[in-house]
Amino acid sequence: MNPALNHSAIPLLKSVDLLVVGAGSAGCCAALAAKGAGVKSVLLVERYGFLGGISTGVLDTFYGFFTPGDQPRKVVGGIPDQVVDLLDAAQSAFLRPNTYGAGTGITYNPEHLKAVWDRLCLAAGVEVLNYSFLVDAIADSSGRITQVVLCTRNGFVRIEAKRFIDSSGDADFCHWAGLPLEVAGELEPAQTMTTTFRLAGVDLDRFQQAGGKKMLMERMKNDDTLPRKAGSAHAMPIPNCVSTVAVRVGDLSGLDSWSLTSAEREGRRQALVYENFFRKNVPGYEEARLIGLSVGIGVRESRRVFGDYRLTREDCLSAARFEDRVFLCGAPIEDHRLGQDGQEETAWAYIPDSGVYDVPYRTLVPAGRDECWVAGRCFSATHDAHASCRSMGQTMSMGQAAGIAAALSLELDCSARAVPISLFQDHLRRLGVPLEPPQEVANTAAKAWKENRKTNLL
Ligand SMILES: Cc1cc2nc3c(=O)[nH]c(=O)nc-3n(C[C@H](O)[C@H](O)[C@H](O)COP(=O)(O)OP(=O)(O)OC[C@H]3O[C@@H](n4cnc5c(N)ncnc54)[C@H](O)[C@@H]3O)c2cc1C
């Protein structure tokens, strides 16, 4: 509970069945899934003026839909597919095949994704409240959380709800509710933060003719001004525009305003260093100009809640199976850290034989709680497991699962931990969520995806 607030002086704005805190990729899917599964009133609250969180404010590529390697298998389904279909209908997405790293990505125009989240939420009847920052969670005399406090454009308000999903990325609901959690960086170094940026006016043909990615990596290696000599610079679904994930800011906290202020400033400084490097040293970029920075610096991890189960490194790398699985993940552990010399080292660890592991429902239920779930990058996992299971294919899947769990618990009037797993899994399967490791190799060529999805991707 936030001791700075006098609850009796704060007006009650409304009562809902389900409150979803934070409208990133996890929160949007949670709200959509809950509404689709019959919850009468779902309120999605978000501190910023748009939906999508990191998916729209920082990035432009969904990873985690496919296993990596040259035999990709599709492990994600349901609402995430609907999101991609709508991006495709807006001619706003393409598949970016690669045979290493996180596997085939789906690159999209993030401004169009904002409109897609709006459209899906409106059509489903999800009520959205932007400019609303959760600053407290209030329990009744039995210890059950029944209300939250939001700081809105209109002042402080209370919201009452029967169930809650914490998809704030930073686990703000769980923090204020006093639930057990780990702050990234306290036990192990936290992953670095990144300000992404976009360049326009790039001549991609000239870049390719001059040696493309290989040439770029060589030139980065030989430049002493760069803060990090690796990263991704990839074409966007907008002519002559390139999106870049290269900046790295370490040793600062994503949970402290002073620290975040320094991180934002440093992220912007580094982006300009890269712009200068590209223009001076990389053929094809001579006329390039910076046209956008991420809305805020991208925080990879901040708080991770302790759930009824914590996903571990061993679970990921042994392709573990769980009776209460609610989605799958085939992504490697991708850990962005600062090395001794201050340079970023990305440590990769792959699931043997391009395997897939199950993610158990219990990682979404804060330990011992009946009335709330956690979804997205603050779910219950160790540092290493989180570094595998944090791509947006998985955060959307977590939101989807948490939303359906909340719907079942309301419908059956049962606690989060009493949701019948077989009923739950049937619901997920009907939505198109794979719960068995897929054998079939997904042909990620555009035509095949189109035929698979029966829509017009690309
Ligand atoms: C730099 C970077 C690069 C990455 N690269 C990739 C990639 O290429 N592909 C990929 O698939 N994944 C990538 N990831 C991982 C992935 O993007 C994230 O794990 C995922 O987007 C997290 O989704 P989320 O919904 O859990 O959190 P977020 O997207 O952070 O959403 C949380 C939402 O909650 C809101 N919020 C927070 N606190 C409050 C509060 N108190 N009250 C109200 N609202 C609140 C926030 O404004 C935000 O909208 C990357 C992550 C980072 C940071």
Image (cartoon, helix red, strand yellow):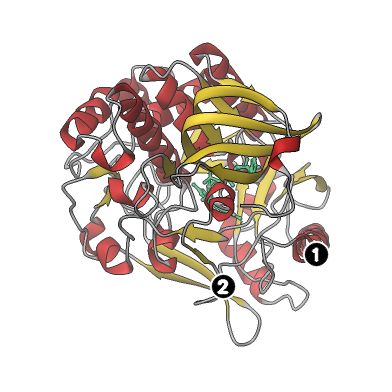
* Residue, disc 1: 258
Q: Does the Cβ of the disc 1 residue fall within 8 Å of ligand 1?
A: no
Badge 1 or badge 2: first in the primary sequence: 2
Q: Residues within 10 Å of mark 2 (few under 14, many from 20)?
A: some
Contact (Cβ within 8 Å) of mark 1 with mark 2? no
Count of numbered circles on the image: 2
Q: Quadrant of residue 385?
A: bottom left
Judge left or right: residue 74 versus residue 117.
left
* Above-or-below relation of 31 to 364: above
In the image, 68 versus 365, the foreground residue is 365
Judge left or right: residue 163 versus residue 277.
left
Cα gap from disc 1 to disc 2, whole angstroms: 17 Å
Looking at the picture, how far across and down is residue 8, in whole percent? 70, 37
Looking at the picture, how far across and down is residue 313, in whole percent? 32, 67
Name the residue type under label 1: Trp
Looking at the picture, how far across and down is residue 446, in whole percent? 40, 30
Residue at the extreme front of the image, as rendered: 141
Name the residue type under label 2: Gly
* Above-or-below relation of 79 to 166: above
Looking at the picture, how far across and down is residue 401, in whole percent? 35, 36
Q: Secondary structure at mark 1?
A: helix
Q: Is residue 458 visible?
A: no
Look at 61% across and 67% down and name the residue there: 192
* Residue, disc 2: 185
